[in-house]
């Protein structure tokens, strides 16, 4: 009896809660874990306060700020960084390029891509004769990437809706997040197909980004094809609401 | 805890002094920047460039400043562009100019060059790094430029490792059965030699002293001009490697008579004392001693001539990992272990970066006695000047990178290492 008191064991009422840890051969669903109290992230941390978002906020924080005394949400372990050089679009592209968790490789690829873009554009900038030409040349690779993604986002996509026994391709509006993902995905796919194919990935990717920023190139052609197909099937657009 | 704190918050004012006991974290945030600030006005006023573009006139005061290399000089010194590292070359093409920073090690070497007694056997200087990517090739280029301007004979081997690493056409030598030829690398070396020293060879009318028989029917008589000999060898590439040996022999014997001062440079010489990637038909590797060109160039290090000055760089690129098939290297594919071996040619070396382990015993025996000069990372002043050079050339594109905050972040990330700084600044 004394030994069982020395070991910290949950009471029988709480044992069901930790069944998933005591019996590792069962899946989470088999242990009746879902549906218990505080098993979902938003339920557990719903009343928690948001953490500090930026360095200036941290330095200017009040002594009597709520966060000193109330429980704070945990920082999601993504690659968010308070560094000057961090950009969310770049992180998104890196996440989409990621394969087998090889984040170092992806970072290297992105760095080399940006370096290639900068070499070309800064070279042009230094060789430009007039100030007007210099103002028009955009050297910042992140801005070029933003422009490329914006130019390549499609607005509509085609779904199959079954009506009266036949499947129709119906154009429906695309949510902006999905559009951004499709744009980045198309950029990467057209880089894989680009010719000459024995050049390195980062040089071809750099060319794709610069072309898309100027509304040229394979990615923009793909997006225009999506729009064209949607335009062709315009007659069925009302199927989305008629069902 | 929540109950207590919620009661406390309701009873505002009464127990304000006791709130600190119930805090999750430090309530008084420390100002990170309240530590001593570096004086910004002195940074902004100091120049980062010199107008003195001639290495003959550089002094100790010019440490940390950039000087522009004349494009004509650059074409003469490195006709194939091999004297400068690849990344630096690409950036120079983007900036539309070639600017090298004047650093202490190259000034030390130049000081030595002014002081030595040319009648003694050649003095050997070894530039070794404190870390990877500390800028030895550029220091060597500064010294080369100085030698070129001072009209010394330049015997320059820009990429010593390429002969052994990338020799796609290594053929067994026609005259000597045990030796191996590298025709392409040899002809490139000969052309570099010719373009470097055109003027000097023409002025002093450098003619061969000995006859060279390449084979039963072909021979070059004594008294041919060296430039003609090089032209002949680039036509008949079969004998280019042996021609390298011929030129070395001529230079060694005649330099004293003609009273020309010679500057011999090798980049990453430790590749001559490490494994090579040339493979014989029976799958055994060729030692560097068995390659004609390497053997010829190693004779330059012997102390049996004078009127010369030898500067040599050691690099991690030079010590090659012997070529292993990818199948045998199962660790290399796994992402976490690829960190070191991912970029071929850069830090493919797992040992300590000391002179002894980079050069190994053969290298030290061949080079001894030498003067070691260590090339360090940037100092604070050099770092600031490099940062302002990049700003001037519009290389730092991020808006926040151009402010003081960005400079501090670059300082934090790169720890004043030149190579890391170039990579970091170039990729953002």
Image: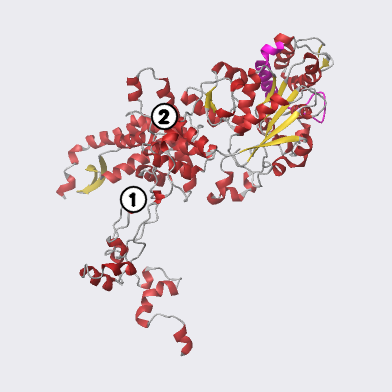
Q: Is B140 situated above or below B34?
A: above
Left or right of A95? Residue A46 is left
Determine whether B64 is above or below B12 in the image: above
Give x and y (percent) for residue A70. Answer: 29, 65
Which chain is mark 2 on? Answer: B
Q: Magenta stretch containing residue B279, yes or no?
A: no
Q: Which residue is mark 2?
A: B394
Instruction: Please tell me which residue lies in front, A95 or B105.
Output: B105
Q: Main secondary structure of the magenta part?
A: helix
Q: In which quadrant of the rendered image does the N terminus of chain B lie?
A: bottom left
- Residue B257 position within the rendered picture, expressed as x and y whole percent measured from the top left: 81, 15
The percent coordinates of residue A227 (x first, y second) are 26, 35
**What subunit carries mark 1?**
A
Give the residue at the far bottom of this rendering: A1
Question: A205 or A79: nearer the eye?
Answer: A79
Q: Residues within 10 Å of mark 1 (few under 14, many from 20)?
A: few
Mark 2 residue element: loop
Instruction: Pick whichever, B229 or B151, lies toward us.
Output: B151
Q: Would residue B280 be visible to someone looking at this image?
A: no
Label 1, label 2: how far apart the Cα atoms are: 28 Å
Question: The C terminus of chain B appears in which quarter of the rendering?
Answer: top left
Is B47 positioned to the left or the right of B267 in the image?
A: left
Looking at the rendered structure, whether the residues under marks 1 and 2 are on a common chain is answered as: no
Residue at the image position 50 percent from the left and 38 percent from the top:
B421
Bounds of the magenta segment: B172-201
Which residue does the numbered mark 1 point to in the structure image?
A54
**Does residue A176 lie above or below A16 as drawn?**
above
Residue B186 visible in this rendered orientation of the protein:
yes
Task: Look at the image and say whether residue B180 sits in the magenta stretch.
Answer: yes
Q: As drawn, is B38 to the left or to the right of B313? A: left
Please say if the residues under marks 1 and 2 sit with CB atoms less than 8 Å apart: no
């Amino acid at each position: 009896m004394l030994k069982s008191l020395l070991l910290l064991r949950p009471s029988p009422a709480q044992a069901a809660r930790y069944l998933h840890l005591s019996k590792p051969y069962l899946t989470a669903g088999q242990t009746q874990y879902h549906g218990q109290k505080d098993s979902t992230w938003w339920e557990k941390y719903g009343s928690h306060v948001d953490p500090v978002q930026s360095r200036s906020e941290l330095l200017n924080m009040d002594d009597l700020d709520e966060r000193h005394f109330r429980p704070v949400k945990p920082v999601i372990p993504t690659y968010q960084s308070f560094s000057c050089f961090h950009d969310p679009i770049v992180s998104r592209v890196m996440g989409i390029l990621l394969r087998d968790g090889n984040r170092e490789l992806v970072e290297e690829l992105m760095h080399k891509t940006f370096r290639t873009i900068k070499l070309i554009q800064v070279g042009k900038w230094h060789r430009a004769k007039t100030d007007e030409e210099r103002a028009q040349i955009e050297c910042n690779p992140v801005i070029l990437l933003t422009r490329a993604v914006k130019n390549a986002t499609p607005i509509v996509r085609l779904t199959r809706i079954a009506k009266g026994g036949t499947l129709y391709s119906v154009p429906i509006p695309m949510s902006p997040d999905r559009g951004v993902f499709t744009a980045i995905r198309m950029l990467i796919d057209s880089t894989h197909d680009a010719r000459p194919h024995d050049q390195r990935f980062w040089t071809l990717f750099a060319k794709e980004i610069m072309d898309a920023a100027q509304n040229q190139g394979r990615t923009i052609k793909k997006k225009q094809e999506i729009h064209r197909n949607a335009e062709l099937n315009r007659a069925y657009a009302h199927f989305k609401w008629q069902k | 805890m929540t109950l207590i704190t919620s009661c406390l918050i309701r009873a505002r004012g009464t127990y304000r002094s006791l709130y600190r006991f119930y805090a999750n974290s430090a309530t008084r945030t420390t100002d990170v920047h309240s530590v001593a600030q570096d004086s910004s006005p002195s940074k902004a006023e100091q120049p980062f460039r010199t107008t003195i573009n001639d290495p003959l006139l550089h002094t100790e005061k010019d440490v940390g400043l950039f000087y522009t290399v004349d494009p004509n000089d650059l074409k003469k010194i490195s006709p194939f562009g091999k004297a400068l590292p690849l990344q630096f070359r690409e950036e120079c093409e983007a900036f539309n100019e070639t600017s090298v920073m004047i650093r202490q090690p190259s000034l030390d070497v130049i000081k030595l060059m002014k002081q030595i007694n040319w009648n003694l056997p050649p003095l050997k200087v070894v530039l070794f790094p404190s870390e990877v990517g500390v800028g030895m090739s550029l220091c060597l280029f500064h010294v080369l430029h100085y030698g070129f301007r001072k009209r010394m004979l330049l015997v320059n081997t820009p990429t010593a490792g390429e002969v052994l690493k990338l020799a796609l056409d290594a053929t067994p030598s026609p005259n000597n059965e045990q030796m191996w030829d590298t025709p392409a690398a040899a002809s490139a070396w000969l052309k570099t030699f010719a373009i470097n020293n055109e003027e000097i060879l023409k002025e002093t009318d450098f003619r061969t002293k000995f006859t060279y028989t390449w084979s039963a029917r072909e021979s070059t008589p004594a008294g041919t001009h060296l430039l003609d000999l090089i032209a002949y060898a680039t036509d008949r590439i079969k004998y280019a490697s042996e021609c390298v040996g011929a030129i070395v022999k001529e230079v060694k014997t005649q330099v004293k008579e003609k009273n020309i001062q010679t500057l011999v440079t090798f980049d990453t010489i430790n590749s001559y004392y490490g494994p090579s990637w040339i493979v014989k038909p029976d799958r055994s590797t060729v030692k560097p001693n068995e390659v004609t060109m390497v053997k010829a160039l190693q004779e330059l290090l012997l102390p049996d001539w004078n009127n010369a000055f030898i500067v040599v760089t050691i690099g991690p690129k030079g010590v090659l990992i012997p070529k292993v098939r990818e199948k045998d290297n199962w660790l290399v594919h796994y992402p976490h272990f690829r960190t070191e071996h991912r970029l071929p040619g850069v830090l493919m070396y797992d040992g300590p970066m000391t002179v002894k382990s980079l050069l190994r015993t053969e290298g030290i025996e061949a080079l001894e006695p030498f003067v070691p000069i260590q090339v360090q990372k940037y100092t604070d002043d050099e770092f600031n000047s490099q940062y302002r050079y990049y700003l001037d050339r519009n290389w730092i594109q991020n808006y926040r990178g151009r402010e003081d905050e960005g400079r501090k972040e670059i300082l934090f990330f790169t720890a004043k290492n030149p190579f890391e700084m170039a990579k970091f600044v170039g990729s953002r």
